[in-house]
Amino acid sequence: MLVPIPFRRRGKDASHETSQVRLEREGRDEIDRITRAVEKVPWSVSLLQILWTAGPVTLLGAWGGYLLGYGRAPTADNYIFFISYTVITGATGIIANLVHQFTGARRAEKTTAKIERVIKALPDLLLTTRDLIVERLEGDARRREAAAMLLRKQDLSPEGVELAALELLDDRDSARIISQIDVYRRVGLHARIRDMVALYGETLEPQFQELAALAPEATDLLRARFTGQAPALQHGVSRDDNFIERVLAAIEQDDELLMTLQDVEEMLILAFELISGRQIPMLTFEYKGRWRLAQAFDALEQARARHRIAQATGLSRLKALMAYLAEQSGTLVEDSASGLRAEVLVERSRNAMDALAEQIQHLAKAVRSGQSQHRRALDQKAELLANAVRLHKQVSEAYEQVGRHHAQLLKMAERWERISHAQDSDGARLQLSPGRRGLRIREHVIELDDEAKAKVCKRLVKHLGSSEFDQHRRTTLGIERERRLSVGVDVSKRLAVEIALALEPHIHLSRPAVQRAINSTNAADFGQLEPNLSAAAKAAMGAAMVKEIEVDLSRPAEQLALALVKHYHVELEPGAIDFLAQNYGAREATLTMLSNYHASHAGSDKPNVSYLSQRPPMVGKPHRDWYRALVRARRALGLKGGERR
């Protein structure tokens, strides 16, 4: 007989509490498992080892040794000696192991506390960094960035969708329409969504096009909501391209301006992903065969890596320049405009620096005429322009390197083609079956084992416990905005540096192949993590969100096939196409098109590929007006009250 459970009306709260307890338990198990991998040795195993070694093993060894040495069995006195020795040795070992267990338990508790602190702090720091990103912007740019962050949330309510649409479009009617579509999406009424898209599409499309010129990424997110699509946990969120390169460049050149706050956000996400158990797949290929071909292969791979790094470095420096100008007040750049072409970014940055130089000229003239109240503004503007000029020079130098590495890449490609056709017919084939020679695809996984997770947490907790970090956490709204931003940005960027240094020994972030693999995958969506959750709950939710990410190797496989065809002149045979399609999900239409590449270029005398198909933008040298403005600013600031010293 089934009896109804009393007080059933509180089932919703009970369910929530049960879910919270389950998260706490799962998260606690995860933390304990990581701790045991480094600190804990099972007591039962240690005790059995001591008893076995100090007992039967010692007696048996003593009896056998005495028999071999003297030719007879030990006497009663000898047995008393051996038994006493065994007892004393065993007791000493047990006491020593007890002491070790007590001290090891305390050490394990300290390790657990460090892991808990890092797991609890990283999501909170992620939210703090996003707040800093928004606070560094001004005006409409701040509203657009905040709205884009809202639209990235997978569990955003219809009211949140309406708020984000209102911030982006500044039209209540359009915002209400998009929120109504989101309501229909939640209940699966796609027929009504299609009706509303057909009814209001012509009205909203001009607004989307106008917004796309200012915020392309936010426009794509909002248009997806209008068509009834929302972010999915399985797909994750896209990463900012080349963020690892910018962080490593900031470390190498000791210049934090090369790193943006978006890069800090990406590093925090990557660290929490790996600690939560994320496994990032990586596809590479290698050649096995004759040494001359192997040498040519390695040379071509190195040339390809240097060329790709040079291309990524130029765009990274350009993004750093745009982010710096956007984060400063009084410039023409309102936001970093992620998603725009490099040519547009170059034009906007140069226009902003031209306007800044003109402002400095007027301020310098005013200070020289005796208007000392403008000295502080002139000093700030001059420092801003000087930093921008330095970043601009790095952009120009980075893009100049592309041409040099391009020439070396062409040279190595010609050498590979010549040697592969002259010496080894199997060198230009993708080997799918066991064999000794040819090009082969290798699968790797970027991950942290439990011991590496504990080591990373131990290193990061040192930085989290520093006085600067504690000062940053205690900052309140009462502190002056400029000072609060300065402290927050500096501490956040140093934390990103520490994360990169902590991860480098374990996953080798500095390797170009690792960076490409990470950039080619989407990050886990941690939007459901809240600051008031415990470390155990955050650990459980982080592990669950990481497991939700679908492993999609189709894009890396297609890129690998493209490199094999264009750079190594590999013939994509039907067996290779089936292999890439079935094992990695690559599109057969794309692979078939690549397989016909050599046939379409067979009658041409020109090289098979143009490695400058994506020509870098014309950056040029810094304008002379920028330097003139800085010189006049220094001269004006060298005056007091308009008189010479």
Image: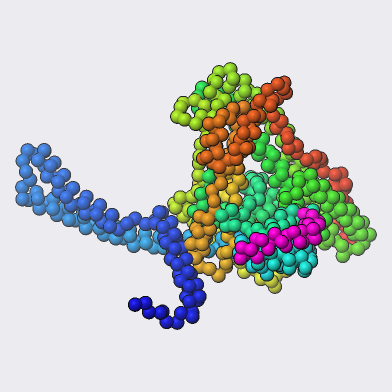
Measuring from the top left, give residue 216's x and y in whole percent.
Answer: 74, 53
Colour mapping used in the image = rainbow
Q: Please give the name of the residue rendered at 62% of the width and 30% of the height, measured from the top-left corner.
A: 595
Q: Residue 146, can we see it? A: no
Q: Residue at x 72, y 50 (%)?
A: 339
Rendered image quadrant of residue 603: top right
Q: Position of residue 189 (x, y in %)?
A: 64, 63
Q: Which residues are magenta?
A: 184-212
Q: Nearer the viewer, residue 74 or 553?
A: 553
Spot the residue most to the bottom.
7
Residue closest to the far top: 422
Tell me the residue at 81%/50% (across/down). Answer: 348
Q: How many marks?
A: 0
Residue 215 vs residue 122, the one in the foreground: 215
Answer whether residue 183 is visible to the viewer in this image: yes
Q: Position of residue 428 (x, y in %)?
A: 57, 25
- State the image coordinates of residue 86 (x, y, percent, origin top left): 17, 53
Residue 628 as seen in the image, left or right of residue 34: right
Magenta span: chief secondary structure: helix
Residue 525's place in the image compared with 520, above or below, is below
610 or 86, which lies in front?
Answer: 610
